[in-house]
Image (spheres, grey):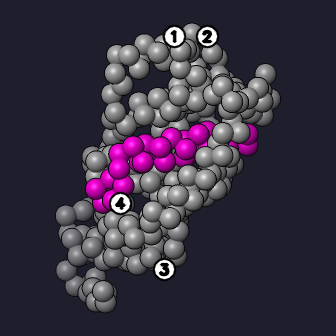
Amino acid sequence: MAIEQVPVAKTETSISNDLTDPVYLKKLRSQMLKFATLQLRDEALAEDAVQEALMGALKNAKAFNRRSALKTWVFAILKNKIADVLRKGQRTLEASRLLRDNEEENNLDELFNSKGLWQVDERPAAWSQPMESVKSDHFWQIFEACLSGLPENQSRLFMMREFIELDSAEICENMNISTSNLHVMLYRARLRLRECLENHWFSDGEKP
Amino acid sequence: MINCQQVTRLFSDAQERPLSLKERTSLKVHIMMCSGCRNFGKQMNILRQLTHEYVKGTQGAHSNEDIADTDNNSQD
């Protein structure tokens, strides 16, 4: 879709202080891009989604007179745009890829022995004060790296579920997968993420 | 008796659907004896909380502005 130029300065004076403030707009845009790129894994698609969300915000900007409300609202629009793109992208979740992900189960099996019990060195350790981590920029870098390290389908489904907070039924319908398939994929994503966070962050000095 | 692999799957499923009484009982019995799965269960909830914090942080919550007036920021 072609994006028409929106005449910002004419009517939306109440909000133009924000969305026409180049410094503010640049920061907001870069936050949105980071968010969208991580989920869509495609910079061009992410750029488009961000652009459309910003345009949508400008068109309806009159109602917003506080910057914080505007920001929250712009992200709500962006979340919807991303959900749309992900839904349209269901082609990419073909059976062959699900199969390939099935093969990865072998790797996950390394976490457990033949009886399905934790391998001794894989057993989850206690995390000390995990919510304190949110204050650390380094933690979020690790979090992003772990998320990016997931197989593509797993991370996409995980983000649809946990970032965009679509419910199971909606994800299954739109991605054309069964509930059990979704639950297996989410399980694997969580196993991996948990392990990655523990190995790279929570195990520092905490491992028994 | 269910094993650790099955227990961890149930902990993940618990984020998606209500577990049956039988499933919940199996979990409880297992984690009484297994510290690894006990930790895992707690960490599933933590993972969800951290993910929500991440999304909030990306939305610029660092700024401490009042952003509580839309439905997007409630976690429950």
| Magenta-tinted stretch | A172-200
- Quote the CA–CA distance across marks 1 and 4: 36 Å
**From this viewpoint, is residue B41 visible?**
no
Which residue in the protein does label 1 denote? B29
The residue that disc 4 covers is A175
Disc 1 from disc 2: Cα separation: 7 Å
Residue A105 coordinates in the image, percent (x, y): 61, 46
**Which one is nearer the viewer's eye here, B12 or A142?**
B12
Q: Quadrant of the C terminus of chain A?
A: top right
Q: Nearer the viewer, mark 1 or mark 3?
A: 1
Secondary structure, mark 1, is: helix
Q: Chain of mark 4?
A: A
Could you say where residue A22 lies in the image, as x and y percent from the top left?
46, 77
The mark found on residue A44 in the picture is 3
Q: In this image, A6 relative to A31: left or right?
A: left
Question: Looking at the image, which is closer to me, A5 or A9?
Answer: A5
Query: In the picture shown, does residue A34 fall above or below A107?
Result: below
Disc on the earlier residue, 4 or 3? 3
Judge whether residue A190 is colored magenta.
yes
Q: Nearer the viewer, residue A48 or A29?
A: A48
Marks 2 and 4 belong to one chain: no
Q: Secondary structure at mark 3?
A: helix
For residue B29, above or below residue A206:
above
Badge 4: residue crowd in 10 Å (few <14, some 14–19, many ≥20): many
Residue with the mark numbered 2:
B33
Q: Is residue A169 magenta?
A: no
Q: Quadrant of residue B15?
A: top left
